[in-house]
Image (tube, grey):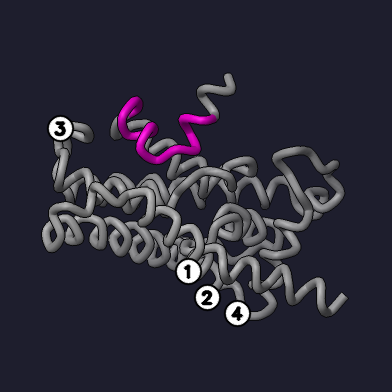
Amino acid sequence: MWDFLKTLTDPQSIIQYGGLWLLLFVIFAETGLLVGFFLPGDNLILLAGILCKSQPILLKVDFFPMVILMIIAAVVGNMFGYWFGKKAGERLYDRKETLLFKKKHLEATNKYYLKYGGNATLILARFLPVIRTFAPIIAGVVKVDFAKFMLFNVIGAVLWIFGLASIGYYLVTLFPGITNYMGYIFITLIILTAIPVLRLIFRKKVEA
């Protein structure tokens, strides 16, 4: 079980051992399941773009079909999160905390809704670890209009998936040896995507 969890948190292992279908499941889970916040969505999408160009045998799919499938997985994931939030409602805030569920994640996402509004949050959240998992859930809790939710759900998914996958794909085209520096790329991406979340948490502690 522990080995399986380690595989799910390592982008290279996900693609190496699970191929396209595990890739799609992880994208769905990170954007649709309450416990999916720890999954490496950004790094995984970037790596998928890189490997689609440098080692196409691993994913066995061309770039644009791969991007379309990942977008569908992200959109469906958010829909599932919205449905869960709508069903759970305000009871979600009374839920007992566990190793994989922390109320601070809900509170951080609520901060984004209050600061940027629901529509912008659904787009911005795609690029923010943890926030992207809880944004559709909160949208369901507060009962955001479903048609409006779907519009920004799709826009956010397209920008997130196509943007990161394209960066990976064309980085290999411009710098063929970039696959030798994947660890540094992942660390940089983790830091960049974590900064907005850390700022939000730090600001909340200061205000408290």
Say if residue 181 shows up in the picture: yes
Left or right: 132 with respect to 200? left
- The alpha-carbon separation of the residues under discs 3 and 1 comes to 32 Å
Residue shown at 34% from the left, 25% from the top? 17
Residue shown at 43% from the left, 44% from the top? 27
Q: Identify whether 167 is placed above or below 94.
A: below
Magenta extent: 6-18
Mark 4 Cα within 10 Å, few/some/many (few <14, many 20+)? few
Left or right: 132 with respect to 90? left
Left or right: 92 with respect to 24? right
- Quick one: quadrant of the N terminus? top right
Q: Are marks 3 and 2 in contact (CB under 8 Å)?
A: no
Residue 20 at x, y percent in the picture: 29, 34
Determine the image quadrant of residue 105: bottom right
Q: Are marks 1 and 2 in contact (CB under 8 Å)?
A: yes
Residue underneath mark 4: 116
Q: Are marks 1 and 4 in contact (CB under 8 Å)?
A: no
Q: Are marks 4 and 2 in contact (CB under 8 Å)?
A: yes
Mark 3 Cα within 10 Å, few/some/many (few <14, many 20+)? few
Say if residue 147 shows up in the picture: no
Which element type, helix, strand or loop, lies under badge 1?
helix
Asked whether 169 or 183 is in front, the reply is 183
Residue 23 at x, y percent in the picture: 36, 38
**Residue 57 tag number:** 3
